[in-house]
Every structure is written in structure tokens, then in C-alpha cells.
Image: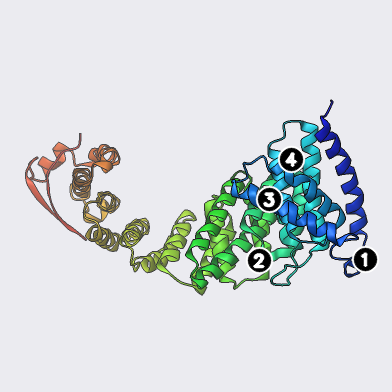
Amino acid sequence: MKFNAYYNTLLKTIAMLIVLSTTAIAQENLQDLPKYGEDSIKCVENISLYREFFRQWKAADYQSPVVNDIIGPWRWVFQNCPLGSENTYVDGVKIMQHQIENEEDIQAKALLIDTLMMVYDQRITYFPYHFRTGNPQKGAILGRKGMDLMTYAPTRYEESYQIMNESIELEGDNADGTVLIYYFRSAVRMVQESKIDTAALVDIYDRIIDILDHNIVGLTQAGDTRWVEHYRNYKANIDVTFEPFASCPDLIRVYSKKWNDNPDDIELLTKITNLLDRRGCQDDPLYLNASVKLHKLQPSPESAYNIGRLMLREDKYGEAIKYFEEATHSEDMTKAFNAYKLLAETLRALKNYPRARQMALKAIELNPSDGSPYITIGDIYASGAKECGDNEFTSRVSFWAAVDKYNQAKRIDPSQTEIANKRIATYSVYFPSLETIFFYGYEEGKPYVIECWFREETIVRAAK
């Protein structure tokens, strides 16, 4: 492919830059190098010249053709006085990004990307410390380098991954949130291309979330609500990306080891329970054990409710009761309502019908417009029917009361209609037969008062 004169010059420049960069990196003592190179006057002149053009370009929102006037003097400064000004590299990134984004030729674009990478490398070599704080800045620069490589050359994902991995190792909790997002995307690409396995991705995810959580806590304590929101958005972005790769076995492996190392770490236990809950990994014993441990260290009605539900799934009804009782003390009326309802259903399973009914009535007090507690009371009456009589008639009258509650449920709450109708169809067949009703001296359609472990006024009905 033929290039115009500009690209011929560019190719030569690239070759020269590679030589110069390699030579520069080999320098053992930068302090021995003159700040403005061998020709200080020309260096200062070219810095001033390119900076003036750069200011004009920036004032035009980086849309002016004056960018073409920047290239010559900027390139001279880059080659001849690398210690002249750190702006050479800050501005150089912007210049190269512009050139890349406006270049259509594939080969030329690849060369420009390489130049952009060299700008980052040379900045690390000559300005390894932040000009204001004096702190090392290699990690931060590598982060931006890795993001740009991932953006402009996505096929070089493995190189991007290595660059950003080093950046995060250097920066630790100070790693930039955007770098973390790009790093995780590059890690996902590594998994997709079979360069690393999903277990490694879980470790990377855990490492990144730890950094984000650390910053969220710190920023919250500092009252910086704007940046707290930014970091929460970073976290949400990574969670969405992680979703397809979060296998339960890998999560269990990673977090089991972490918990074994730090069994009383409340923050870790919270992370374990939240993550396993989000990923649908509640069946593993780790989830229940971590939930119970967290509740012991930091009890709350909400955690008690979650543990109670887990106990129900394992048919541990007796253990579930104490947790649901704690959960009923929640200040959130909806959560307290749900706790009373599940407590009633648990007590029914244990055949403690009087107390089960009492808890269902508590739920109704909290939310009279929800029909589900009436379904529960109906189930309680049906389950305990035989306890209300010792003959063919009295042992069946509770089914009338059960059906009454099902009808009441759908009357006050239409969303319960389907389940109520199924229950009515199931238990209506258990009503006393017409012959039994006559035999015991009653008449269909007449009022009847059930006097048992509960008292209900109902209507005599025959089985259908």
C-alpha cells in the first residue's frame, strides 16, 4: 500500500522513536541527563511553539486543523528533550488519540497505536513521580495505557490485561474505577479465549470488588456522595459483566478459603451471603453457615428472616421458628408481615395449630388487604380438622371453616383467586356427606358454630 508524504515521514519517525525510547529506558541515572537536552534553546522554543498550537486546538474543542501544526514541534521535543516537560506526554496522549480516531488506514493506525504506547512508556521512564505529591505514578499511567490499548486495539486484549494487572498491583486500593472496569473486561476476554479459567476470573472479581468496597466505605465516611455513586456504578457495571461467569462451585471454592482464614470478618461474611444470594448459590452449606455466623456477630431481623427461610428449605422447622420470631421485630412492616406469615406456616407444619393461627392473625393486623394469611388460616383449619371431633361429622366440620377462609382471601385480595379456588376444590370433597349431616340432626344451609381449639361461625354444607 502506498502512503502519502505524511505517512512516509510518520513511518520514519516511528522507527526513530523506537530507537530513542529504547536508549532512554536504558539510562541508569536520569539526573545525569540535561533537562532540555543537548540544545536547550531549541528545546524551549519547540515546547513553546507546540504548546501554543495545542492551546489553540484545545480552545477549538480539538476540532481545528491546527493539530497538524502541533505534530512537528511536539515530535522534536519528544525525541530531543524528553525531560523538558511532563506536558509532552500528557498532550502527546491527546494528540495520538486524535490521530488514531481519525485514521482509516489499518497499518497506519497500528503504527499510531504503537506510538501512543511509547508516549505512556516514556512518561513512566522520565517522570516516574507525580509532580505535586511526589508519589510514584507508574501504576496510574499504566492503567490509562491499558485502557487505551483495549479501546484502540481490542485484539491485543492479552497485552492490555497484563498492563492493567500490573497497574492494579501497584495502585492497590487507589486503582481508578474505570481502570478496574476495563481490566475486568480484558479478563473476561481472556476467559473467552481460554487464556485463563473461570476460577481465575472469580479471584479477579473478588480482588476488584474488594477495592471498590474499600473506596465506597472511605468515600461514605468522607461524605463524598457524588463519588460514592460513581463507585457504586463501577461495581454494578462489573457485576453485570461477571453474571455469565459466576459459577457456584468457583464462588464456593474462593469464599470458603477466605472464610476459613477470617471466620469472624463481618464484612467478608456480608459479602459471601450477598454474593451467593445474588448468584443463586444458596443450596451450598456455605451460604447457610455464613448466614448463621453473620447473624451471631451482627444480629438483625432481616438476617433472621433469611436464615429462617434457609432452615425451611432444609425442613428444619424447629430451628426456623426462633429466627422467624426474631424477624417479626423488623421495623419494616412488610418484612414483619412476611415473617409472621412464614412463622404461621412453620408452626402449622409442626402441628402447633393454635399458635400458627395466632401468628397468621398477627400478619392480618399488619396488612388487612393481603389475602395470603387467610389462605394460611384455611390451611391450618384443614390440617387440624381431625382434632376438632371424634366422629364422621365433627371431624369434618373444620373444612367448612377452611373453605370460608379461602373465599375470604379471594374476596379481599383478587390476586389470591387462583390458589383459593384450587384449595376450595380440594377440601370441599371432605365436607360431611348429606346422609351424615341428617344422621347427626343437622340441616344443610343452617348456621353452625365450630367449638374447637378455635371458634368459627359457619354454614352446614354437604360434600360435592
Going from N to C along the chain, the mark reached first, 1 or 3, is: 1
* Amino acid at pointer 3: Phe
Q: Which mark is residue 419?
A: none
Q: Secondary structure at mark 3?
A: helix
Q: Considering only vertical position in the picture, is 162 above or below 228? A: above
Q: Secondary structure at mark 4?
A: loop
Going from N to C along the chain, the mark reached first, 2 or 3, is: 3
Q: Nearer the viewer, mark 1 or mark 2?
A: 1
Going from N to C along the chain, the mark reached first, 1 or 2, is: 1
Q: Which mark is residue 28?
A: 1
Q: Which mark is residue 54?
A: 3
Quadrant assignment, res 166: bottom right
The one nearer the camera, 339 or 459, is 339
Q: Nearer the viewer, mark 2 or mark 3?
A: 3
Horizontal side of residue 236 vs 76, given as left or right = left
Q: Which mark is residue 173?
A: 2
**Quadrant of the rendering where the N terminus is positioned:** top right
Q: Are marks 1 and 3 in contact (CB under 8 Å)?
A: no
